[in-house]
């Protein structure tokens, strides 16, 4: 059983990441998703592993950088709730939009 839960947006993010990477290399896409899922286990065990970004969200949310991806999660939920998984080259502030509350 997973110790984290993906929101529909986070699940969609992971699907989009895989599809984008798979156009060039399926093995790389698979490896990236495995790395991201493995990384999500860390805050699931220790919720305050990530960092707070008050410019993007209130203190209930944490951010974990994995390679070029930002995992956004709610630190106090059980199981840990992953809100989004976004590439850092994208406009994270705009994509988070109304998904999470600020400060």
Image: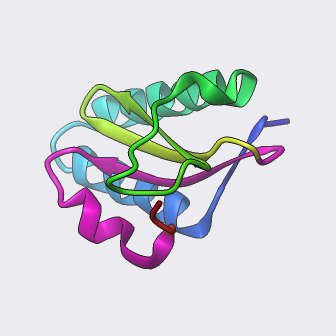
**Residue placed at 36% from the left, 56% from the top?**
56
Q: Residue furthest front?
A: 103
Front-lying residue, 41 or 48: 48
**Residue placed at 78% from the left, 35% from the top?**
3
Q: Quadrant of residue 45?
A: top right
Front-lying residue, 4 or 54: 54
> In the displayed structure, does residue 22 sit left or right of residue 57?
left
**Residue placed at 55% from the left, 48% from the top?**
59
User: In this figure, which colouring scheme has been used for the structure?
Assistant: rainbow
Q: Quadrant of the N terminus?
A: top right
Judge whether 18 appears above or below 16 on screen. above
**Residue placed at 31% from the left, 38% from the top?**
69
Total count of labels: 0
Give percent across and percent down for residue 39: 52, 25
Give percent across and percent down for residue 27: 33, 29
Whether the magenta-drawn stretch holds residue 81 is answered as yes
Q: Residue furthest bottom?
A: 98
Judge whether 64 appears above or below 98 on screen. above
Residues rendered magenta in the picture? 77-99
> In the displayed structure, does residue 2 sit left or right of residue 102?
right
Judge whether 37 appears above or below 19 on screen. above
Judge whether 48 appears above or below 55 on screen. above
Whether the magenta-drawn stretch holds residue 8 is answered as no
Q: Quadrant of residue 102?
A: bottom left
Give percent across and percent down for residue 19: 31, 55
Q: Quadrant of residue 98?
A: bottom left
Front-lying residue, 18 or 25: 18
């Amino acid at each position: 059983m997973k110790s984290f839960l993906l929101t529909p947006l986070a699940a969609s993010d992971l699907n989009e990441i895989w599809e984008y990477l798979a156009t060039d290399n399926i093995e790389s896409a698979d490896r990236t998703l495995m790395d991201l899922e493995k990384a999500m286990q860390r805050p699931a065990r220790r919720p305050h592993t990530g960092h707070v970004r008050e410019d993007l969200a209130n203190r209930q949310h944490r951010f974990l950088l994995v390679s070029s991806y930002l995992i956004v999660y709610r630190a106090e939920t059980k199981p840990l709730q992953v809100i989004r998984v976004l590439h850092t080259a994208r406009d994270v502030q705009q994509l988070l939009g109304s998904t999470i509350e600020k400060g």
